[in-house]
């Protein structure tokens, strides 16, 4: 006999997540710049991205403090007010991985741009811009842009709790058919 409704708490949780899902946020982890040295002369960095209970990770780049990942990580967004935390680690084989700094950012301005009617804008039009401030981890101005029919945001994050390092990322929204997003 097949039950009519999910009975486990995990199934119920998944069902609620799907019900409240606005869409998917693709975060392209582009590269790291001048990351901290945690091994003898270099580091083996990778990035962990967390939003709520979701946790995603890039591959490890061996012996490089200026790694290029160009790797897409996709988060399910049901609460756009949750901050996104990005942490860089140095992979170690025989001991616990070392932290190489972290940064937090929010997607409120990005989500507001998604709600606008942008269809008639020309590609490359800046919708909104955010300036670096003490309250955010921006290394430089970040613009939400209408590009090739999509809302895109390039972000340069200055890592905190470390002597040096920045991470370049790009945000892009993925609409899901039959959802609220």
Image (tube, rainbow, N blue to C red):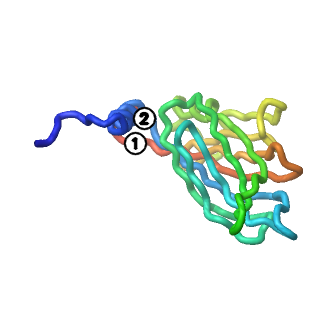
Q: Which residue matches tag 1? A: 176
Specify the quadrant of the image occupied by residue 126: top right
For the C terminus, give its image quadrant.
top left
Q: What SS does tag 1 mark? A: loop
Q: Residue 105: give x, y in percent of width and height.
A: 69, 37
Q: Is residue 127 above or below residue 124?
A: above
Q: Residue at x 66, y 63 (%)?
A: 69
Disc 2 residue crowd, few under 14, some 14–19, many 20+, Cα 10 Å: some
Q: Residue 114: give x, y in percent of width and height.
A: 54, 34
In this picture, residue 122 sits left or right of residue 38: left
Mark 2 or 1, nearer chain start: 2
Residue 179 shows in the view: no
Q: Is residue 163 above or below residue 132?
A: below
Residue sitting at the far front: 94
Q: Which residue matches tag 2? A: 21
Specify the quadrant of the image occupied by residue 141: top right
Tell me how far mark 2 sits from mark 1, CA to CA.
9 Å
In this picture, residue 36 sits left or right of residue 21: right
In this picture, residue 56 sits left or right of residue 15: right
Q: Residue 87: give x, y in percent of width and height.
A: 70, 48
Q: Are marks 2 and 1 in contact (CB under 8 Å)?
A: yes
All told, the count of numbered labels is: 2
Q: Residue at x 48, y 41 (%)?
A: 76
Residue closer to the observer: 84 or 68? 84
Residue closer to the observer: 181 or 136? 136
């Amino acid at each position: 006999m097949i039950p009519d409704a999910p009975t486990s708490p995990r199934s119920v949780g998944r069902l609620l997540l799907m019900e409240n899902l606005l869409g998917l946020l693709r975060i392209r982890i582009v590269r790291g710049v001048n990351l901290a040295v945690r091994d003898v002369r270099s580091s083996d960095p990778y990035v962990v991205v967390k939003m709520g209970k979701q946790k995603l990770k890039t591959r490890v780049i061996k012996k490089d403090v200026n790694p290029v990942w160009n790797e897409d990580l996709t988060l399910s967004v049901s609460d756009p007010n949750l901050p996104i935390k990005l942490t860089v680690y140095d992979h170690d084989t025989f001991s616990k991985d070392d932290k190489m700094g972290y940064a937090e950012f929010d997607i409120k301005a990005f989500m507001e741009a998604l709600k606008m009617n942008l269809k008639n804008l020309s590609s490359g039009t800046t919708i909104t811009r955010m300036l670096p401030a003490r309250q955010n981890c921006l290394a430089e101005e970040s613009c939400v842009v209408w590009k090739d029919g999509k809302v895109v945001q390039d972000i340069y994050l200055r890592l905190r709790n470390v002597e040096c390092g920045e991470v370049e990322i790009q945000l892009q929204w993925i609409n899901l058919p039959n959802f609220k997003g």
